[in-house]
Image: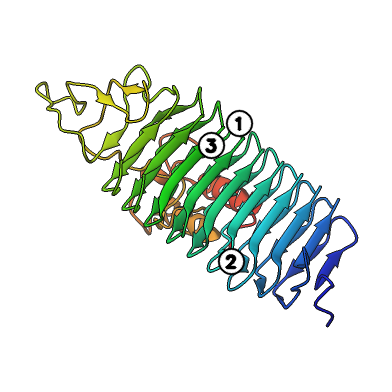
């Protein structure tokens, strides 16, 4: 193989690439798997290592990247450039030289249940908007766990950023929503907002970050009308025992204030239909729902995805359909 070629250069739409090991495409911007202007492709269960880019999507849309491993000495593990409406789910991007997962000028993508460990940067968005990051885990990054630069209108929910240099960093970014995230044990800041404004942050947990749990040089909203965030360095009291501190929490760095700081960490919202507690919807959950429906397992409200107050074969079918829509594992 020529190291200056992509291992897979996808030339058509609706292509499935599954179960391959792709490596040693080390030339500049060469990739283990490369899509340029492609749509409706399924990239799953592949192992990409020792490439310049492990998996690279350029100007590509409506593709699914599922259960891939982009580890070990890629420059970027997974890279999207000018790409939209793609789904990245259950991928692992560890021990890459720069970003585990990187989006540049990309919009309306969903990143869910991905893991990025021991990269320079875990997950990065650069001039990217309207993306959803949920249930991702980023840890042991030399720089930032999750990094948004000049990006807007993104949603970050239920992500965990731990043991990085800095947990979550927004720079020159705006109008995003951050909720139910946990930034803990980072060696610098838990979350740092630099020249970033008009974002909403609530139900987040900032725990035992060495410098400051939170830092904001501009003005953002750190609570809703009813609830804010948890800070492990909050020193106020809760005399009425409503779970919210009686005094506000001044966010270091500027004029932002959390008027409703939580006294205890916010508990992650259970995922409806996740019956085996693995934070994802799989065919195993559908099988469990069917067992509940026929009475061989006790009732579990999390299986009532139809909302009719009982568990039936309809709930199992809905869970299975959700699983297939997400290309989840059996």
Q: CA distance from mark 2 to mark 1?
A: 26 Å
For label 3, the SS is: strand
Q: Is residue 133 visible?
A: yes
Residue 241 position by quadrant: top left
Q: Residue at x 53, y 30 (%)?
A: 176
Residue 144, percent from left and from top: 48, 51
Residue identifier under label 1: 152
Residue 305, percent from left and from top: 48, 40
Q: Residue at x 40, y 30 (%)?
A: 216
Against 65, residue 155 (above or below) is above
Q: CA distance from mark 3 to mark 1?
A: 10 Å
Residue identifier under label 3: 171
Q: Quadrant of the C terminus?
A: bottom right
Q: Quadrant of the N terminus?
A: bottom right
Residue 163, percent from left and from top: 36, 57
Q: Residues within 10 Å of mark 2 (few under 14, many from 20)?
A: some
Against 209, residue 26 (above or below) is below
The numbered mark at residue 97 is 2
Q: Is residue 108 left or right of residue 287?
A: right
- How many dots with numbers? 3
Residue 205, percent from left and from top: 32, 40
Q: Is residue 305 visible?
A: no
The numbered mark, 2 or 3, whose residue comes first in the sequence reads 2
Residue furthest to the bottom in view is: 1
The numbered mark, 2 or 1, whose residue comes first in the sequence reads 2
Against 22, residue 229 (above or below) is above
């Amino acid at each position: 193989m020529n190291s200056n070629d992509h291992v897979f250069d996808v030339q058509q739409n609706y292509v499935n690439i599954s179960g391959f090991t792709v490596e040693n495409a080390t030339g500049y911007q060469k990739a283990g798997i490369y899509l340029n202007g492609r749509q409706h492709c399924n990239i799953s269960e592949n192992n990409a290592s020792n490439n310049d880019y492990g998996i690279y999507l350029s100007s590509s849309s409506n593709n699914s990247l599922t259960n891939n491993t982009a580890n070990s000495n890629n420059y970027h593990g997974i890279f999207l450039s000018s790409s939209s409406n793609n789904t990245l789910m259950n991928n692992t991007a560890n021990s890459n030289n720069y970003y585990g997962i990187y989006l540049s000028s990309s919009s309306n993508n969903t990143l869910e249940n991905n893991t990025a460990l021991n990269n320079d940067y875990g997950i990065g968005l650069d001039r990217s908007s309207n993306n959803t990051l949920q249930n991702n885990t980023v840890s042991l990054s030399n720089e930032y766990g999750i990094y948004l630069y000049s990006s807007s209108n993104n949603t970050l929910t239920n992500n965990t950023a731990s043991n990085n240099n800095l947990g979550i960093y927004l720079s020159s970014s705006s109008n995003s929503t951050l909720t139910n995230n946990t930034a803990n044990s980072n060696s610098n800041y838990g979350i740092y907002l630099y020249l970033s404004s008009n974002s909403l942050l609530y139900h987040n947990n900032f725990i035992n970050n060495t410098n400051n749990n939170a830092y904001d040089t501009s003005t953002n909203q750190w609570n809703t009308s009813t609830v804010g965030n948890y800070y492990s360095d909050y020193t106020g009291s809760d005399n009425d025992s409503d779970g919210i501190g009686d005094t506000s929490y001044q966010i270091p760095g500027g004029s932002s204030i959390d008027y409703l700081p939580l006294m205890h960490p916010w508990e992650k919202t259970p995922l409806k239909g996740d019956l085996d507690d693995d934070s994802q919807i799989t065919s195993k959950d559908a099988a469990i729902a069917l067992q509940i429906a026929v009475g061989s397992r006790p009732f579990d409200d999390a299986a009532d995805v139809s909302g009719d107050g009982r568990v039936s074969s309809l709930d199992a079918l809905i869970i299975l359909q959700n699983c297939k829509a997400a290309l989840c594992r059996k």
